[in-house]
Amino acid sequence: MDQQDNKLQAEGVKDKQTMELPKENVPQILVVDDAPDIIELLTETLTRQGYRVRSAASGAEALSSVAAEAPDLILLDIRMPDMDGYEVCHHLKSNGQGHGMPVIFISSLDETIDIVKGFQAGGIDYITKPFHLHEVLARVETHISLRRLQMQLEEKNTQLQQEIMDRKRAEEELKKHRSHLEETVFRRTADLRRINDELQHEVVEREKMEGVLEQTNYKLHSMVYEYGLRQQRLNLFNQMSERLQRCISLEETYPIISQFAQDLFPLAAGSLFMLNSPQNLFGAVTSWGKALSGEKTFPAENCFALQEGKIHITADFRSDSCCRHILGGGRKSGLCVPLTAQGETLGMLHLQQRISPSTSAQPGFDELSEGFNEEMQQLTVTVADYLVLALSNIKLRDTLKQQAIHDPLTGLFNRRYMEETLIREISRARRYETPLGIIMIDLDHFRRFNNTFGHEAGDLVLRDLGKFLQSNIRKEDVACRYGGEEFTLILPGAPMDITEKRAETLRTLVQDLEIYYNGRPLDSITLSLGVASFPEHGGTGETVLQAADAALYAAKRAGRNKVSTAGKEEPARTAQIYSFSN
């Protein structure tokens, strides 16, 4: 952690302590962890960034601290002696103290189920230990900003409600005044009939007062409408945010985004474009509204917003400022907002709106104006910020899930995933009364590559062997790295004879595998393989795996570069090649 801290200082992270802010406006962060070194590191780093930092070494202490003074954000560990982080978060969310307060879990638990429990408990983000201080600071700053934005919106709504109440009181006063005026005019009419000039003067004054009252009434109705529209948008934002947080893949978010975008932009057609990394193209994943013009797929160069990294408005489709992906849009204005998270462009939010040839000189308060005015632009940017947060969180969760089940060196599934898959496939084979084959594989004389060429060459051999296994199995087969230079293949539906043929085929083909290190070819590799089958060699995945492992060691004892079958003394030497066509 000290090295990370020094590195953070060396790279020139801005010291926010130089910012002259009133103490009550400085964001306050509560760090909850039973490890003193973690508390010290985070407290020192966050304080240096200008935050006010409190700490707690247990769950009970954290709840007491929040009850005494609510922080702007909580960094919460999971494993603690008296109460774990999940319970602390549940307490905060259930008793109302932590409503709206962002909680970021920081834990060494990096399994998918632990991360999911963190989000279910009410956490808004999850960081695994050991962590990078850059990542912690970036996420803290993001969630502090979002928290402050939410509080500002709530404050503005409170102010608007107060203004509406003041306006209503003014309207009542005006109504009383008007009533009094009418009564006065009625009483004086009889007295002033003989004096026509004075009567005309009174009529003119009355008309003036009615005009003022009408203008005041119009402004009041306009404010009521504006408040209702803002409240409706806030409700839509909250609903969209809740539904997006429940999504587990990007594909699930697209219909939700389309539905709420239609409600938020009723006069505009639009589309959400996402970056296709392999092709480096932006493609439309969902659209809403009618008569949307432009390309469905295009490179970043065709959009000024993506090139400049900021909002771009196209008012004239014949000008040089028009994005090339919407050329030929006719009488429409276009708006593009890039979706960027921590320097990475995820996609682009695009809207189009028809331009009217003429506008009313005095529109009613309930008429919606056309074109992308300042309010419309701000609304679009706010929607884009919501989408960036939701989509980046989903991508992060998907990345963590992939990292949790794959071996980082070979790209194959890891041992834990293999054990879970074996239990599932054995259960399916037992239910449908079908066989299941297991092949245990060991790379012969692997230490020779490490000792002769170095560990980098050994890693290269393991990676190429992983690619070889992945390209020479069926789609339904599962290839895993068991550990070190040992691999495991699970073959659902494969009887014993087919499993033996596949093992022999792999043994034969791998000898033709050419591996180059620093431009030099390495020695050809050979494999020792052990074969077993369910239910022939066991009624559980563990027993079948043990049988295949025992057969593997029998092949190694017999001289390596052989296939051995569980229950047979001599390794199999079948020369027939099995087809791997899917």
Image (cartoon, grey):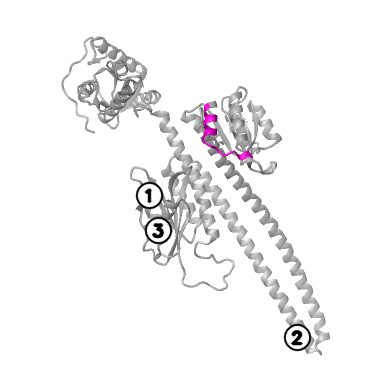
* Left or right, residue 58 beside residue 421: right
Mark 3, residue position: 323
Q: Is residue 427 left or right of residue 527?
A: right
Are discs 1 and 3 less than 8 Å apart at CB?
A: no
Q: Examine the rendering and report whether any part of residue 377 can be seen.
A: yes
Residue 445 is tagged as none
- Image quadrant where residue 176 sits: bottom right
Q: Position of residue 132 (x, y in %)?
A: 51, 31
Along the line of sight, the residue nearer the viewer: 13 or 475: 13
Residue 505 placement: quadrant: top left
Q: Which residues are magenta?
A: 3-17
Of the two numbered discs 2 and 1 on the same chain, state the one appearing first in sequence: 2
Residue type, mark 1 in image? Phe
**Residue 338 position within the rendered picture, expressed as x and y whole percent measured from the top left:** 45, 50
Q: Which of the two discs, 1 and 3, sits closer to the camera?
A: 3
CA distance separating discs 1 and 3: 14 Å
Name above or below for residue 263 compared with residue 142. Answer: below
